[in-house]
Image (cartoon, helix red, strand yellow):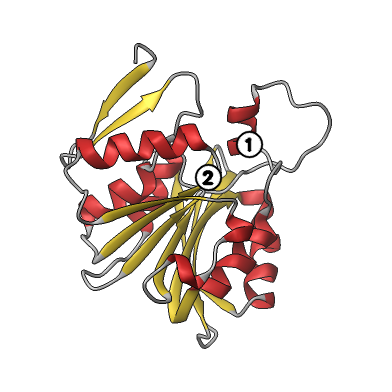
Amino acid sequence: MNNLTLEHFENGITIYQDQNLYKFTADAIKLAKFCKIKRTDNVLDMCAGCGVVGFYAYSLNECNKLYFNDIQKPMCNLIRKNIKLNNLENKCEVIQKDLKDLTLADFEKPLDVILCNPPYFKVNGKIKENISVAMCRHELTTNLEEVICKASKLISSKGKLYIIIPADRFCECVILFNKYGFEAKRVEISYFKDVATVSILEGVKNAKSGVKINIKKEGL
């Protein structure tokens, strides 16, 4: 337990992090703040890590049911600690599975919202990090296309997929959205020193075309 630290957020959420596992970054909070969730929604935090995206999004806009999915047992155990810590046992469920194995049977009905902060980097050469951290940062067990493909099978018509990716993968993401039935409806691109850094996208299943794009300076 000595490797656990607590992160306190301004909206009352408290999150355990494990110093031996992957630790979330500011991108997770950006994604949570970008999401639009309703009280009646059933929501999945996919590739959840410690669950910070789902917990923070829930603290801003409560939902009907909040699911967390991660392939790693230590991460899922950490999510369970965070559920208990925030007294959300009656609202949350943890599904420890490779996302390739997720099916509609894992949920009460097709999901209304899916949130995903996926592995950012394609595997290119030797991975120097420990395997647990590497699985969160690099596409070792899944990739962007598998994430979007699986989301399209779990989400309802007009359901929303929210995803954050490096800016240099923006076009790849839009192409995959279209391939699997999503239309990009809102986009936020952050930049630093005139260089785009990350992109956050809202994809709506079976929606008409038309997108709103916001350009935002890092730190604002």
Counting from the top left corner in percent of width and height, residue 35 is at 36, 60
Q: Residue at x 49, y 72 (%)?
A: 104
Q: Residue furthest front?
A: 105
User: Which image quarter: residue 67?
Assistant: bottom left
Q: Earlier in the sequence, mark 1 or mark 2?
A: 1
Badge 2 marks a residue whose secondary structure is: strand
Q: Amino acid at mark 2?
A: Tyr
The reply to whether discs 1 and 2 touch (Cβ–Cβ < 8 Å) is: no
Q: Residues within 10 Å of mark 2 (few under 14, many from 20)?
A: some
Q: Amino acid at mark 1?
A: Met
Q: Which mark is drawn over residue 191?
A: 2
Judge by depth and name the residue closer to the eye, 201 or 180.
Answer: 180
Q: Which mark is drawn over residue 161?
A: none
Q: Residues within 10 Å of mark 1 (few under 14, many from 20)?
A: many
In the image, taking residue 28 as reference, residue 5 lies left or right, namely left
Q: Nearer the viewer, mark 1 or mark 2?
A: 1
Judge by depth and name the residue closer to the eye, 131 or 137.
Answer: 131
Q: Residue at x 29, y 71 (%)?
A: 41
Residue indicated by mark 1: 135
